[in-house]
Amino acid sequence: MQPTLDQVVTWTTEATDIALKMQGENLKSHYKAAFELVTEADSAVEAYLIEKIQAQFPDHSINAEESGEHDRDSDHKWFIDPIDGTLNYSHELPIWAVSVAYAYKAELQIGVICNPAMKETYSAAKGQGAFLNGEPTKVSSIGTMNEALLITGFRRNAIGTPRSNIRNFTRLSLETQTIRRLGSAAMDLAYVACGRAEAFWEIDLNPWDVAAGILIVREAGGVVDSLYGDGELLIGKVNILAANPLIFPQMRSVLLEERDKL
């Protein structure tokens, strides 16, 4: 048995209600690793979503940010990021989201990203297109780099290493209109899907950060792949490039050039 898109949208929306309610309270938090903040809301939202999934699909596997792998039937796998952009959430900066995806036999089938602060829900089911608040959405048609707005991020633990992303940022800053750093990979991908940005790339993410967004971008007509075309997107650490189909090959070319200089 597989879930429906409406079912996942409902659960994700309900989960954001929990996050919004807790945001207005005296929220407790701690660091699970250096500079990696986790709040009570992250745990509460994740627990709610896992409870919903396991009640309806007890045999499905789940990969969730805070509680890790719940291994069951590997053909059915969920990816949960309870609050993507926890630092933004904790500072009440409205760029964060609850992100939920479902895959069958390693193929993404459903993706939902809900940003309640902006009253936006992005969703997609395989082969059915992408939607923003229930209305069809698609990637932009901009095809030249000097008109393109890009989004990226930087992993603190990679700064000072060849994987810092600084070289890519510097090079692409010279070739594009601008680059933004927003602090939520889920929202970065959502913004590519709805045409607010032409491309997003980042290094050392996790599958739960990007799973829902990957499907939404693809269903919106975009292209998503590993950064250099030689990696995985739903296993281990993720290096990702997502863009409209005109900008994607230009981005890939620049990124490969910079990699070959290392």
Image (tube, rainbow, N blue to C red):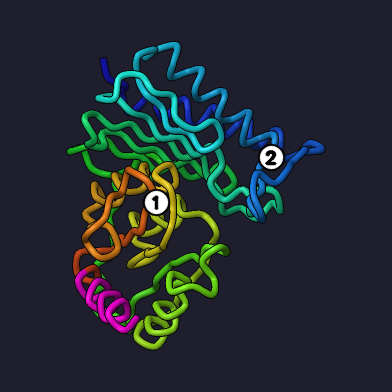
Secondary structure, mark 2, is strand
Q: Residues within 10 Å of mark 2 (few under 14, many from 20)?
A: many
- Image vertical order of residue 159 relative to residue 10, above or below: below
Residue drawn 31% across the image and 21% down it = 3
SS assignment at label 1: loop
Residue indicated by mark 2: 39
Instruction: Say if 188 sits above or below 27 in the image.
Output: below
Q: Quadrant of the N terminus?
A: top left
Q: Look at the image and say whether residue 58 sits in the magenta stretch.
A: no
- The residues bearing labels 2 and 1 have C-alpha atoms spaced at a distance of 23 Å
| Residue 85 higher or lower than 47, as above or below | below
**Which circle marks residue 153 in the picture?**
none
Residue beneath the point at 39% across and 51% down: 237
Residue 83 placement (x, y as % from top left): 56, 41
- Relative placement, left or right, of 123 versus 221 is right
- Mark 2 belongs to which amino acid? Thr
Type of the residue with mark 1? Lys
> x, y (%) of residue 242?
30, 60
Residue ID for mark 1? 237
Residue 16, visible in the rendered structure: yes
Q: Which residues are magenta?
A: 249-262
